[in-house]
Image (spheres, helix red, strand yellow):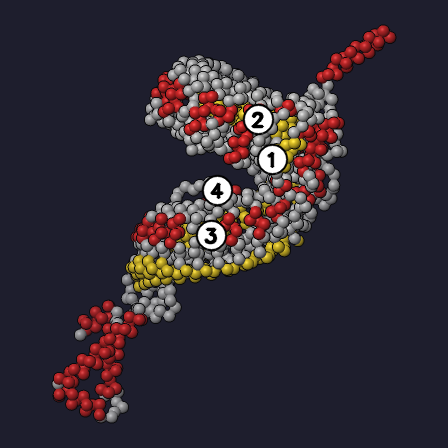
Amino acid sequence: MGVFLQMLTVLLVIMMVSLQGWLPLGCLDEERIALLQLKDSLNHPNGTSLPSWIKADAHCCSWERIECSSRTGRVTELYLEETRNEEMGDWYLNTSLFLPFQQLNALSLWGNRIAGWVEKKESLSSLEVLGLSGNNINKLVASRGLSNLTTLHLYNITTYESSFQLLQSLGAFPNLMTLYLRYNDFRGRILGDELQNLSSLESLYLEYCYLDEHSLQSLGALPSLKNLSLRALSDIVPSKGFLDLKNLESLDVSYNTLNNSIFQAIRMMTSLKTLILPSCELDGRIPIAQGFLNLKNLEYLDLSYNTLNNSIFQAIRMMTSLKTLILRSCELDGRIPIAQGFLDLKNLEYLDLSYNTLNNSIFQAIRMMTSLKTLILNSCKLDGQIPIAQGFLNLKNLEYLDLSYNTLNNSIFQAIRMMTSLKTLILNSCELDGRIPIAQGFLDLKNLEYLDLSYNTLNNSIFQAIRMMTSLKTLILNSCELDGRIPITQCFLNLKNLELLDLSSNTLDNSIFQTIGPCDLNHLQKLYMYDNDLSGFLPRCLANLTSLQQLDLSSNHLKIPMSLSPLYNLSKLKYFDGSDNEIYAEEDDHSLSPKFQLESIYLSSRGQGAGAFPKFLYHQFSLQYLDFTNIQIKGEFPNWLIENNTYLHDLSLENCSLSGPFLLPKNSHVILSFLSISMNYFQGQIPSEIEARFPGLEVLFMSGNGFNGSIPFSLGNISSLKGLDLSNNSLQGQIPGWIGNMSSLEFLDLSVNNFSGCLPPRFDASSNLRYVYLSKNKLQGPIAMTFYNSSEIFALDLSHNNLTGSIPKWIDKLSNLRFLLLSYNNLEGEIPIQLCRLDQLTLIDLSHNHLSGNILSWMISSHPFPQQYDSYDYLSSSQQSFEFTTKNVSLSYRGSIIQYFTGIDFSCNNFIGEIPPEIGNLSMIKVLNLSHNSLTGPIPPTFSNLKEIESLDLSYNKLDGEIPPRLTELFSLEFFSVAHNNLSGKTPARVAQFATFEESCYKDNPFLCGEPLPKICGAAMPPMTPTSTNNEDDGGFMDMEVFYVTFGVAYIIMVLVIGAVLYINPYWRRAWFQLIEAPSNDPNSISYGFPSIFLIKSQASFRSPARAQRSTMQE
């Protein structure tokens, strides 16, 4: 027994000695110290990048941005992108700091403003990959430490001169094999001459560069080149310089505009294996097929997003070595016999024909591709009329099949059942439902790892089949109309390998967690259950998901504690979204440190929550995204949160009841890009140090607070700022002119403040400006030339100010304008003809001004309101808002609903003339308000074409004639008023929505009759009485100014006639004088009666036509 123990001990010692070289040594102390010194060098004096690099943690291989060898434990890769504060300016890197890393083979220093380095003689012999993009390096100085460099990244060199110096210094790296020179300007450079010393160079990437023809031609001087990418070149067509590249194996010229000559060159590249030509504007006019005839070795061909014709398929047929063919969105259809081009592609393994319109013949060809492993037929308009199943019967090697966005029928599932090698199956949006027995098609898919059945209507049987897929790692059942009546929990029993489960947008309740549910999937890494009917507290069983990295329970009815205490044991959790639930504060918020380090937290709620920030946040140091919108937290701005999380990118604390001054962190945080503190109770002035603390801001929302004073000048120095919202505060003074110099600005909202003075003179530099809201201030003066150069403006709101002058004639410069609001100002004059050229305009409000003239018919008829709208980015959809009067109520519109809103409001002005009938062409308009003007004539019958209109107000004008009876066809109409006009005839029939309109909608139209008015049509009409219009002292429907003028003229004429008669006839003259000399108080005397007779005649002249006709008959 003793001998046996001795032998066993010796054996164990031998095993330990033999394995010593293979065991990781852990973090070497010298490398750990070097890393800490490197951190100090990058951040000196007060930088906060790399927070996990701390002295107390000896395991540096677990620190962020570090990769170590699993064999030796030494650092092999360092990723130090954007770790130095930009405000510290250019600097020289001491390369000796990297010398302890003897096995370092990859180093990335992107975006650190390095201008050069201090050279040392020591060697970094293992370094093979170096990334120096986004720095200010003028020259690369080679040393023995970089002699083995094989890959170099030099993106976005700062200046044109820098690119020249760098190219000259590249020859010092003889072993360089791969060179990335993206986003640079090489015009005027002979690249071939400057790179010809790189004798080992095999791969060159000149993507998104500025080149000229000489630069391209010189590439022929690089005979060793095997891989060349010229993607998305600017100002040049890559057509020359390829003839001498005989050894080229991969060529990417995608996203360029090609012409014929390039295909002559491609034809000579007989070694070519990969050819990438997407989005090159190829079509039938370019004979591209001849360029492919000699490409016998081609294995990868991508012609996506071009318009192909028949000839190309004759050439494809000859490429018998082809393994990958991508023809996405090439406008293929049944008119092109593409099947013949595939018949001889026996080696094809990858085929993508998505976004085309296929017919039966293609499936005959697919059937012959027995080597096919990946087949993508997404959005090909397949349906039950095409027998596609026969095309799949022989695809025994198929591993990836995507048939999403088609209409499938039963037969396809018989074929799927035979594909036993299938690993990925995507049937998203295929109109599957309970009538199709799809379960039988899944029974034999034992190797399936990825299954997507989202946006279909599933029934019970499918879950019996899913239960058998024991290899499944990803299951997506989003929007499948699942509910508690479907026993889906049984399908999880055998899915022990599941890593991603998506059950979102169904109607599942808490029963999903009972028995064998998602909580029993020990390998689950991502669980998405948003938009369901989950309720109550967080299920306790979630704590069992120890592998969970992402959890989304948003848009349910759950009660989630702000502390997230039920999730503390999930050490791998990085992402949690509990927004749109009931968020509450626990009575005892303990200060325990959770095991997780979250990167994203979304807890925006419906306004619940109370107390302070949860204490677990003090233990989080990796946060990148935090959203606590609508949680009533109270307290001051958490500057400590930004200090602790140096990689924080987005911070949203809207409507959180925060108060006090806006306290900034002590140090600069370049990474913070989005900050919203709107709708809180912050007071005081906006800190002037905001630019120094947050120099990388792209979006700053501070609306709805109590900020006062002026806008700090430092905001204008944030060159990256795209969105600025300071609305609903107490800011004052003039709007600073430097705002017009912010070149990146897209969204500006300064409304509801106390700004005064004139508008800034120009927004010359703000060429990207799209949304401008300056309403409800005290601005004055003319609009002048303020927005003359802002051609990209989408929405302009200057309403509720004291602006004067006229609408500028350069308004047509705003060619993209859709929303124009100038109401409640003191603008005057006529609408300029240039306004007619704004053919994108969908909402215009000129109400409550002093505008005059006619409503021009050509202005309206040129505006068919767009029926389709551009998708809004997060800037416009979340913040864009405006106030508009509709249905006789002034409402505020916010968010994505704006894109569907169309309307015209010209009310409360001095417009005259008739209403243009062309307005009836605006079939999509929802609001039309022309009230309180002096418009005349009839209501255009074309108004019956306004099928989408909801509010129509023509009141307080001088309109006459009848109301068009076909207005009853406007079924969307909710508000209607023609009150205070001179309309006559019968009111519209009391049908549909017109049955809801009351008497007030028609009142003060003297000749209008019918319900709901008290006047009955056909009865004797009363004498005409004056009717008020838009002017309260108008005196009735007669124009009183005309009456007074005509009365005076008639009176003078009558006096002159009487005088003439008396002068001519002496008898009447004597009688006249006798009468006037006889004093008499008798009312029958002529001296008394002359005026009376005149008045009687005057009154008779204004009798109604009916009364005058009766008087004539009596006489």
Query: Toward the viewer: 2 or 254?
Result: 254
Q: In the structure shown, which secondary structural element does the residue marked by tag 2 occupy?
A: strand
| Residue type at tag 1 | Ala
Query: Toward the viewer: 544 or 890?
Result: 890
Quadrant housing the C terminus: bottom left
Eye-nearest disc, 1 or 4: 1
Eye-nearest disc, 3 or 2: 2
Q: CA distance from mark 3 to mark 4?
A: 26 Å
Q: CA distance from mark 3 to mark 2?
A: 44 Å
Quadrant housing the N terminus: top right
> Callout 3: 10 Å neighbours few (<14), some, many (20+)?
some
Q: Residue at x 75, y 33 (%)?
A: 55
Query: Toward the viewer: 487 or 385?
Result: 385
Q: Is residue 17 above or below residue 761?
A: above
* Picture disc at residue 475: none
Q: Earlier in the sequence, mark 3 or mark 4?
A: 3
Q: Residue at x 27, y 90 (%)?
A: 1081
| Residue type at tag 2 | Leu
| Residue type at tag 3 | Arg
Q: Residue at x 71, y 20 (%)?
A: 72
Q: CA distance from mark 2 to mark 4?
A: 39 Å
Q: Is residue 13 above or below residue 52?
A: above
Q: In the structure shown, which secondary structural element does the residue marked by tag 1 occupy?
A: strand
Eye-nearest disc, 2 or 1: 1
* Image position of 978 (left or right of 20): left
Query: Toward the viewer: 711 or 573?
Result: 711
Which residue is label 3 attached to? 762
* Picture disc at residue 872: 4
Which residue is label 1 attached to? 115
Looking at the rendering, which quadrant does residue 174 occupy?
Answer: top right
Q: In the structure shown, which secondary structural element does the residue marked by tag 3 occupy?
A: loop
